[in-house]
Image (tube, grey):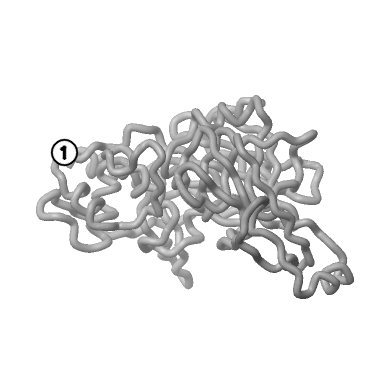
Amino acid sequence: MERRVLKTLLLASVMALGGCLAQSPEHTAARVVHGRTVAATPAASPSVPIQRPSPSFSPSPAPHDFSDVVTRLQDLGYLPLVHAHIHGKDRNIRHDAWLWPVSTALQNAADEYPWNAGNPFIRGAVIQFERANGILGPKGVSEGKLHKTVMQALSEKHANPDPWPYEWVYVTKANGTRQPEQLHVWEHGKGWIWHTVVNTGVLGSTQDGTWPIYQRLPKTTMRGVFPQPISWASYHGLAGQRVPQWAGSSLMQPARGTVGGSPVRWVPYNDPGILWVNYFDDGRGIHYYPRAAYGFPQSAGCVEEPYHAAPVTYRLLHYGVPVTVSGALFGLAIPTHGTQAKKN
């Protein structure tokens, strides 16, 4: 009850505020996948009150519908976000409300998704709950679904509250600008606590969108195919040819394809010893990968970090943290509060 009262008081204060497919816990492979597009334009701060229903939840009996689950996650501290709209003259605008000030980019990302079980911020809260309540093992994988075990654990009177401060990862591609590609970590109560240069996927193969971290591995093997850009003449010359799905595999696939409308040749690879991996999007991960330089697209879809930066990012993050990838410049997402990001 105290947490719910606190949440109500905090809401009153913010009303005017603005690749690498996992095959097993040990082995992963890369492929190009597509995600949801996130708007990069800053969201306007609301100037009229946010109206929302007053949720209520009793740990017993078990939560029986989506609103009960959301309220329980909010009360336990896993979801500091409330579904809301701005109601004003001639408008009814979606604007989900955080319990404290957040960056413009984080507000934009939250507003982009429907308020249902597929929402990446809600899925992230479920994954965090699974980890903190012993449902996920050390190398577990979770899609953040409301399966029977989760529902039962949510109904327990003494379910563990969220032990971690709320965090969010913001990857800015900014391709074609002087600003290098970067990864930023935001933490409630501190603001921007860390950033480093990174590489994203060639030909836009790291799509814009938001996904929660669903698996973390300090070391793994990545297998897959790299999209090597080619001419259309070379593309047509590869008609009917096939290549292994990864280097050394007996499984075959077409030798050619397209990424972002551009022709590519699929080049198989098998890379053991990839360090400090956070998987967030159907096989895409944040991890160390050796390159001569960083800050521009080079990967098969993952977010690659330098050797000295990757373990820092790995130690800061945990299961369920939402990762937003955007083509916006970081300067357009000035935080409303918090400290200056540490330089790598």
Farthest-out residue, left: 61
Residue 197 appears at what percent x and percent y?
69, 35
Residue 326 in view: no
Residue 238 vertical position relative to residue 244 in the rendered view, above or below? below
Residue 243 appears at what percent x and percent y?
71, 62
Name the amino acid type tagged 1.
His
Residue 278 appears at what percent x and percent y?
52, 41
Residue 249 in view: yes
Q: Which residue is mark 1?
A: 158
- Residue at 39% of width from left, 56% of height from top? 49
Q: Quadrant of the N terminus?
A: top left
- Residue at 35% of width from left, 53% of height from top? 82
Q: Quadrant of the C terminus?
A: top right
- Residue at 15% of width from left, 45% of height from top? 156
Q: Nearer the viewer, residue 269 or 226?
A: 269
Left or right relative to 215: residue 209: right
Assign a secondary structure to mark 1. loop
Quarter where residue 245 is shown: bottom right
